[in-house]
Amino acid sequence: MTKYKGIVNIGNTCYMNAVFQCLFTNSILLQSLLKTHRKILTEEFLNQANDYHSNKTTPLNISSLKRVIDRKTDLFRGLEQQDSLEFIEWFLDAVHNEIKTKINVTLTHNTPKTVGERKIYHSHLSWKKEYSKGHSSIVDLFHGQYQNRFSCMSCGSESYKFEPFVTLHLSLDEKDEPINVVSCIKEHLNKENLHGINCKKCKKDTRHQKQLTILRFPKFLIVSFKRYSTTDKIKTNVVLPLNIELGENRPHSYKLTSIINHHGDNLYSGHYTSILFKNEFMHSLNDESVNTSKIKGSPISSNAYIAFYSCV
């Protein structure tokens, strides 16, 4: 059974504590990292995770891990409040760069003939180019792939671009009514009209329609909400269902595993907490404090900033 432990705030490190609560309790991530050739950051992270799951009853102190992070980057040095989203994206990338290995990827496709076959081939080719020089379990667990389709509105010709992602950055508008995270994702993937895009067939700039889709779904999906497009916080309530399905042709089922909340009106002030979901219980973690209660339906919050979903 997973044990949940508070983490000591060593000086405005709540943004870091909230992230590590979500990562220390990800058993698949921990098991995958144990199989790698590790360097100092990954090794210290696993040491701290081991202490987190030990029988010690005192809150975890991550000072040694913070020192390693400070040696790796100056982004989070000192004791100023930082952004949890910026931190987790940096951390996953830093671990990836420590443990990545070169792999040989061979595409065994026949010569693509149809539009669909060419699309699949080029998506695989893009994935190969992106990761053949550096692949890791971070890629396997957290990376997905977007497909951008650009359609000329004059001649109808289409072109495709493929790119990886780690986080779905979802826009929010100020609304009185709660909005479901699935609706936010659908809005994120909506068609968009673009002007002044060069069309090779028309041989001039024309209007294009851009359609974004998720081609590869990650094992662990991270979504963030753009609550700070201006200096004011967007306080719209977001509904985070315990279970969601994404994708049209082949739906992918996900379950909610954790949430990082930001309390306050400014991104670089206020306070970060996390909530972890396991079976019928939710565990609210506020630095050293741990409170457990029964889940009473889908969470709804105006403070939800980052949500983690696991593919089932």
Image (cartoon, grey):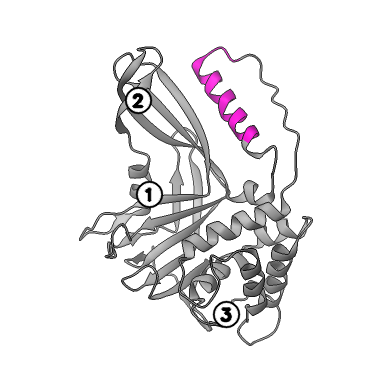
User: Which amino acid does the dot numbered 2 rest on?
Assistant: Ile
**Amino acid of disc 1:** Val
Does residue 280 appear in this view? Answer: no
Q: Which residue is mark 2?
A: 197
Q: Name the magenta segment's main secondary structure.
A: helix
Which of the two marks, 2 or 3, is nearer to us in this view? 2
The part of the chain drawn in magenta is 112-129
Q: Residue at x 30, y 20 (%)?
A: 153
- Report crowding for label 1: few under 14, some 14 to 19, many 20 or more residues within 10 A (C-alpha): some
Q: Residues within 10 Å of mark 2 (few under 14, many from 20)?
A: some
Residue at 50% from the left image edge and 47% from the top image edge = 253
Residue 99 visible at all: yes
For the point 66% across and 58% down, the residue is 29
Q: Earlier in the sequence, mark 2 or mark 3?
A: 3
Location of residue 311 in the rendering, given as x and y in whole percent from the top left corner = 55, 50
- Check contact, mark 1 vs mark 3: CB within 8 A: no
Residue bearing the label numbered 1: 182
Q: Nearer the viewer, mark 1 or mark 3?
A: 3
Secondary element type, mark 1 = helix
Question: Is the residue marked by circle 3 packed among few (<14), some (14-19), or many (20+) residues within 10 Å?
Answer: many
**Is 114 a magenta residue?**
yes
Q: What amino acid type is highlighted by mark number 3?
A: Ile
**How many angstroms separate mark 1 from mark 3 (CA)?**
31 Å
Q: Nearer the viewer, mark 1 or mark 2?
A: 2
